[in-house]
Each structure stands twice: as structure tokens, then as C-alpha cells.
Amino acid sequence: MDDLNKDLDINYSEQNNTELNHTELNDKIQQPKLKVRKKLPLWLPIAAVAAIIIAILAGMNAYSSSPAQKMKKQLSLGERYLTELNFEQAVAAYTEALKIDPDNTDAKEALVQTYLAWAESLGAAGDTERAIDVLEQGIEKTDDARLKEKLDDLKKEIASADTGSLFEQAQALLDEEKYQDAIDVYQAILAIDPVNADAYLGIVECYIGMGKLDEALQWAKEGFDKTGDQRLKEKIEMLESDTVTDNKGRPVKSTHYDANGTMIWYSINGLGDEGIRTTTNYDPSGAVVAEYQNEFDEEGRIIVSYSVLSDSGKLANRNIMTYENGLNVRRDAYSVETGDLVCYELMQYDADGKNIRTDTYNCISPGYENHNYYLYQFDENGRVCRYDCYDDDGTLKFYQIDERDENGKPVKSVVYEADGSVRSTIVHE
């Protein structure tokens, strides 16, 4: 019995053990075993992300700090400042760009254009001195020809504005024949604008008016060398010729020739130091053969003049003028050598006040007819173009024909014998 119970206990235990195994198996089936990982610290993921961000930013910074990107930034900055008319900052931006790449053509061109625009803006505002400073600064930085040209043009504009009133003053003095005063003003203009051709021309005209042709030629040559002005070259050619005229078309230098075309003497008219117009006659060698001054009344009319010998230029007579109703009706000629009355002339006029006839009466000169008369012809402008000399019985003795250019200036006077042969020629221009 005991043995039977023992067997039963064993079986029961085995049965229980079997049941336990099934339970455990079910647990294994129903609840799979999870694999547990070790928990990481919190700071490690954050550090990784930060490292990634830093790497990205570093890459971007490296790209943005490249020379190409720096250049692009400076050009863009300069363009913005230029659009805002902030020229100084634009210049700084483009200058910085050229530090990055001194050969960058876009930066060079932008800098030049900025200087040009800056100077233009200052000039329009009337600040020409600052405009000059800006252009000179630009030339120093770029050596650009356009900036140099703009600077030259601006200086000429300033000089023109500064000299405008001076020119008016000088021209008025020239017209009034206050030649030395006019020269002083023209030289003041040259002090402002050393290559002013008009100022050189004015000085040349003054010396011509004074009869100082050597000085006139010297200034004409200097002016042409400095300016290249064609008008000064023309003055040089005139001053080196046989005939010189002043700015009013009056003969200043006249050259006299014989029938064979040989020069026998020449004369120069000029305003003396005392403001009196003087005529000096020279022989072909340049030696003075006569010098005289006409005299004028308070109304500016000639009251004393002189006549010369046509074959030598030496003084012959001193002439005293008489006026009636504003017209010269008589001239008495006295010998310069003896003081005796040589002859006198009586003038007749038409209704327009033109001298149409002059009768000459010889007083003491042997070999001359007692009475000759002259008849005058006029051109369409009322100027004498010819006169004929007759003796007392109306026989033609000689005649003279005067030639003028298209501007009315005397060119040449030719004296002909009655038979048409040339007696003498006077070249005025």
C-alpha cells in the first residue's frame, strides 16, 4: 500500500512537472523575451547635430569668403551706393573691389563712371572746385583718359566764366585804342587760361595798333606755338608781308614800289606813347627817313597833316586844314624845310557830302603848273576808287586807281601816266 502510494506520488509529481513545463512554454509563446539596450546619455545626439550645423555653416562661410564672392559683394555694394547717389561710399566699395582683384575690368569701369558722375553732380550744383578735386582724385587712382578730358573741359569752362567779363573790358579798351591798358587785361586772361587764343589775338592787335610790329609778331608766334590757332598763323603771315592792317582795317604798314616793282620805302602808322598817332617812313634798309604826327581838334578832325615825297618817303609839306559846316574846304601846304606856303587846295562836295573835286594852286614851286584839279569817282559804298588829275586847260596828267578786298579794306593803289603806263604802286595788303 505504501508502495502504491509512493508510486502515485511520483506520478503526480511528474504530472505537475509536466503541467509546469506547459505553463512556462505558453509563457514563452505568449510573451516573447525583449532584448533590452543600454540607454545613451542625452548630450550625445545634441552634440552630433551641432557638429553637423557647424560643418554646414563653415562650408557656407568658406564659399562666401572666396575672392569671387567678395568681388561680387563689393560690386553689388558699390552699385547700391551709386544708385543712392552716395558717391563717396560707392568709390570706397569699388576701391575695395580692386584690392581684391586689381585687374577686374568691371570694378575699374565702375570706379571711373562713379568719379565722372560725382564730378558732374558737383558741377551741376556749382561746386566746381570740389568737382576738380574729385576728378584729380580719380585720375590719381585710375589714370583714365576720360577723367583727364573731363578735367580739362571743366577747367576751360571755369576759365571761360572767369574771363568773360575780362574779355568785354579788354575789347572795349582795344576799340578805344587804349592799347597798353588792353594788353594788361589780356595778359590777366592768360594768367587764368595760358592757352587762350583770343587773348593772344587781342595782344597782337594791340601791338599792331601801336605800330609795334616786331612785338606783334613775337606774340603771334608764341600764341600759335601754344594754341595752334589758325587765326594766329594768319596774323604771322600778314606781319611778315609788305602790308599790315589793324583791327579796324586801317593800313598800319604800307610799302611803296617804283614802276619796276622795286621797293623804295615803307611806312608804319601807330599810336605813340602819348596817345598820338604817328607815321614813320623807312628806306629799304630800315633806316628812318621821316616821322610825323597828325594833329586833331576837339571833335576828332585832322587839323594838321603831312605829305611826303613819293620817290623817297621824306617829308615834303605840313598841311593846315580849314572846316566849314563840318567839311574840310581848304588845305594850305607849307614846306617842311622852309616854312613857305607851297600850295593850297579848295574842295567841292556834292549833296551827300562827298568830295567830288579838288583844285590845287601852286604858289612857289618851280616847274609845276599854277593850277591843277582832281576829279573823284566812288564805288557803290561811297568810297573813292579812282581820281584823275588834270592841268589848267583840262588835259589829263595822270590818274590813280584804288583796289579793295571783299571786306572793303585797301589792297593796292596804282598811279598811271596819262598813256596808261604805271608810274608807281602802293601795296596796302
Image: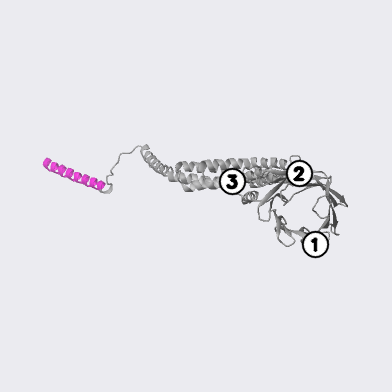
- Depth check, front residue: 244 or 415: 415
Judging depth in this view, the residue of 9 and 129 nearest the camera is 129
Is any part of residue 391 visible from this angle? Answer: yes
Residue corresponding to mark 1: 395
Magenta stretch contains residue 17: yes
Please state the extent of the stretch shown in magenta in the rendering. Answer: 1-28
Q: Which residue is mark 2?
A: 292
User: Based on the displayed image, in which of its 4 quarters is residue 55 positioned?
Assistant: top left
Q: Quote the CA–CA distance across marks 1 and 3.
A: 57 Å
Q: Earlier in the sequence, mark 2 or mark 1?
A: 2
Mark whose residue sits in front, 1 or 3:
1
Q: Is residue 121 visible?
A: no
Helix or strand or loop: what does disc 3 sit on?
helix
- The image quadrant where one finds the N terminus is top left
Please indicate whether residue 175 sits to the left or right of residue 155 in the image.
right
The residue labelled by disc 3 is 225
Q: Position of residue 160 (x, y in %)?
A: 66, 46
